[in-house]
Image (tube, rainbow, N blue to C red):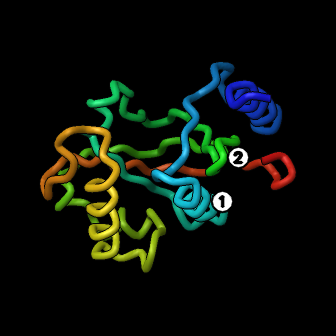
Amino acid sequence: MDTQARIVAFWKQSRGAVDGLPEAVPDAWAFGATPEHADGLLSLVLDGTKTATASSLWDYEATGEPVPAVDSYSILLDGQGRPVAVIQTTAISIVPFDAVTESHAYREGEGDRTLEYWRESHERYWRAHSENARGFEPDMPVVCEGFRLIYAASASLA
């Protein structure tokens, strides 16, 4: 089964398990830039540690992808591109990198969950993996997204 077919089948399974999910299949994506990073961050979502993420607004502009909207759904993929979970966006704010809050950094659940760790790891990430020509700047616009886990497949279904 190819990736898109897996995503469609997973969405059908999700809709059968969770009342009220829309018929249209939402965007499916993985965290990070490597399979290992995707799996590590996904595990933080699945265990309830990670309830937020951050993206470069410049990357959205460069790729033409829309910024997530409150109440929208996403399918999270593992490092192999398999659908594993559904999240719903609960909050969006766009702030300069140097204005991201300690609270947001904590909700991202990474490292020691401090703002210092968040700044170091995200600067390193955007310097290495930006999808836009500007890369990283201390005042770059960051899309801070809060979310909640709606559904997760069992390990045997991933």
Residue at 75%, 37% in the rendered image? 18
Q: Report the residue marked by disc 1.
A: 46
**In the picture provided, is 122 more to the left or to the right than 73?**
left
Counting the numbered discs, the total is 2
User: What is the x, y in percent for residue 36?
Assistant: 57, 60
Q: Is residue 101 visible?
A: yes
Q: Residue 134 has which mark?
A: none
User: What is the x, y in percent for residue 119?
Assistant: 27, 67
Q: Do the residues labelled 2 and 1 touch (CB within 8 Å)?
A: yes
User: What is the x, y in percent for residue 76?
Assistant: 60, 44
Tell which residue pokes out farthest to the bottom in this image: 112
**In the picture provided, is 84 more to the left or to the right than 79?**
right
**In the picture provided, is 56 more to the left or to the right than 96?**
right
Task: Indicate which label's residue lies in the foreground, 2 or 1.
Answer: 2
- The one nearer the camera, 71 or 112, is 112
Q: Which amino acid does label 2 sit on?
A: Val
Q: What residue type is labelled 1?
A: Leu
- The one nearer the camera, 128 or 58, is 128
Q: How crowded is mark 2: few (under 14 residues within 10 Å), some or many (20 or more)?
A: many
Residue at 70%, 46% in the rendered image? 84
Local secondary structure at mark 2: strand
* Quarter of the figure with residue 105: bottom left
- The one nearer the camera, 116 or 6, is 6
Q: Residues within 10 Å of mark 1 (few under 14, many from 20)?
A: some
Question: For the residues marked 2 and 1, what is the alpha-carbon distance in whole angstroms?
Answer: 9 Å
Residue at 51%, 58% in the rendered image? 51
Q: Report the residue marked by disc 2.
A: 84
Residue at 17%, 49% in the rendered image? 140
